[in-house]
Image (spheres, rainbow, N blue to C red):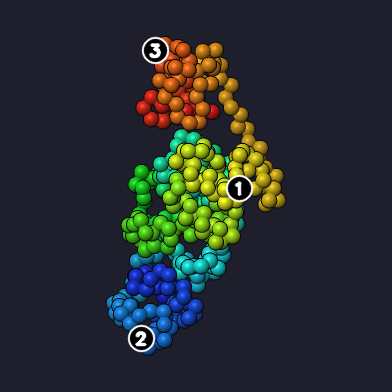
């Protein structure tokens, strides 16, 4: 048997709690020794109670090491453990280091990694920021890390993918369980574009609420910088920020309006000393300078649209926060049908979009 067989056995074992596996490796040195340990030796570690040890030994005796490993090798998934040379360096010294990670795709080196996290129910403004930040990080050679959740996570991944960048999703489920299901296309694009979908949880693990806080420590640990775009007062993104503080990572946020529930968490982080992203291009330039690089110049000029005076006037009524047609009607002094016609013409040009019924935001 090769060492990978024993590592796979220990990865697959569900009797030993996730938080105890790395500690057992410290005690026994490797998974081969754990596999071959007697009950007395396992008891001597003082890391497991007798009931857990009995279950562990019983399941070990039923585990067909060679067949189970062979079957796994015939799936599209891979795994890496703290016993492996290619285990991410950034994870090795954190508190509660994961014993191993299952993944699909290709693990990057995580040398230039920025995580984008934020609200699941984000605003159109948050969506725009996450897309733009993901695009510019991807275009400039950074790995974008996020959790593939709805909202900010999704748009951060999407922006990076659209620019041909490298992005990694850390899941709170098994890496074969696509959650939310509507992100199946993003999942496939991440894998096919040279990125990776990663989880410390067993294949087939459901996306249970208790899994996500543990997942967030990995998002933070693998990143150099954590960016929070929109977060409520009680948000999983703030858990990631707490881990980032613990890991000594830089935290940046995009500021929001006072009184907006989606800005409560981010504005509190600002009050606690987080960096502020006031301009995405400036932020990217500062990152590149910190890595000893010059910024890439993109030919990304805005379209030269020829708008009528009335179209310009109506376009200027809107911004990056949703505005209702009734409010625009009052501000414009136009009649309803005329306003609606102009709004629809701007929507057709792709510079205005309806984010929910009769509420529009600028796209450029």
Of badges 2 and 1, the one in the foreground is 1
The reply to whether callout 3 and callout 1 are in contact (CB within 8 Å) is no
Alpha carbon distance from label 2 to label 1? 52 Å
Q: Which residue is nearer to you in this view: 119 or 326?
A: 326
Label disc, if present, on residue 39 of the rendered structure = 2
| Residue 216 x/y as whole percent | 46, 57
Q: State whether residue 325 is above or below residue 140.
A: above
What residue is at 58 percent from the left and 57 percent from the top?
249
Label disc, if present, on residue 224 of the rendered structure = none
| Residue 161 x/y as whole percent | 50, 43
Alpha carbon distance from label 2 to label 3? 81 Å
First of labels 2, 3 by sequence position: 2
Secondary element at image label 3: helix
Residue 136 quadrant: top right
How packed mark 3 is, by other alpha carbons closer than 10 Å (few <14, some 14-19, many 20 or more), is few
The reply to whether callout 2 and callout 1 are in contact (CB within 8 Å) is no
What residue is at 59 percent from the left and 21 percent from the top?
304
Q: State whether residue 275 is above or below residue 1.
A: above
Secondary element at image label 1: strand
What residue is at 51 percent from the left and 21 percent from the top?
317
Label disc, if present, on residue 337 of the rendered structure = 3
Which quarter shows the C terminus? top right
- Residue named by callout 1: 275
Alpha carbon distance from label 3 to label 1? 45 Å
How packed mark 2 is, by other alpha carbons closer than 10 Å (few <14, some 14-19, many 20 or more), is few
| Residue 316 x/y as whole percent | 53, 21
How packed mark 1 is, by other alpha carbons closer than 10 Å (few <14, some 14-19, many 20 or more), is some
Residue 101 quadrant: bottom left
């Amino acid at each position: 048997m090769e060492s990978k067989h024993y590592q796979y056995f220990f990865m697959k074992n569900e009797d030993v709690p996730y938080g105890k596996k790395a500690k057992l490796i410290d005690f026994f040195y490797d998974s081969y020794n754990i596999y071959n340990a007697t009950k007395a030796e396992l008891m001597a570690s003082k890391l497991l109670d007798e009931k857990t040890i009995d279950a562990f030994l019983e399941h070990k005796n039923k585990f067909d090491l060679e067949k189970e490993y062979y079957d796994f090798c015939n799936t599209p998934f891979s795994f890496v453990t703290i016993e492996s040379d290619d285990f991410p360096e950034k994870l090795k010294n954190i508190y509660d280091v994961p014993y191993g990670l299952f993944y699909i795709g290709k693990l990057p080196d995580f040398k230039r990694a920025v995580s984008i996290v934020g609200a699941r129910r984000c605003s159109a403004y948050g969506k725009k920021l996450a897309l733009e930040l993901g695009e510019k990080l991807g275009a400039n050679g950074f790995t974008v890390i996020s959790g593939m959740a709805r909202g900010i996570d999704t748009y951060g991944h999407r922006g990076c993918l659209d620019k041909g960048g490298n992005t990694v999703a850390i899941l709170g489920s098994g890496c074969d369980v696509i959650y939310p299901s509507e992100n199946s296309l993003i999942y496939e694009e991440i894998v096919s574009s040279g990125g990776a979908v990663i989880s410390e949880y067993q294949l087939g693990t459901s996306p249970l609420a208790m899994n996500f806080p543990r997942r967030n420590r990995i998002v933070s640990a693998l990143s150099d910088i954590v960016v929070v775009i929109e977060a409520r007062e009680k948000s999983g993104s703030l858990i990631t920020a707490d881990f980032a503080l613990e890991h000594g990572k830089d935290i940046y946020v995009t500021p929001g309006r006072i009184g907006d529930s989606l800005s409560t968490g981010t504005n509190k982080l600002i009050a606690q000393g987080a960096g502020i992203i006031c301009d995405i291009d400036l932020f990217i330039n500062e990152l590149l300078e910190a890595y000893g690089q010059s910024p890439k110049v993109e030919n990304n000029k805005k379209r030269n649209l020829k708008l009528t005076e009335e179209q310009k006037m109506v376009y200027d009524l809107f911004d990056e926060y949703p505005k209702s047609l009734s409010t625009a009607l009052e501000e414009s002094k136009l009649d309803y049908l005329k306003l609606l016609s102009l709004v629809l013409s701007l929507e057709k040009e792709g510079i205005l979009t309806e984010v929910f019924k009769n509420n529009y935001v600028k796209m450029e």
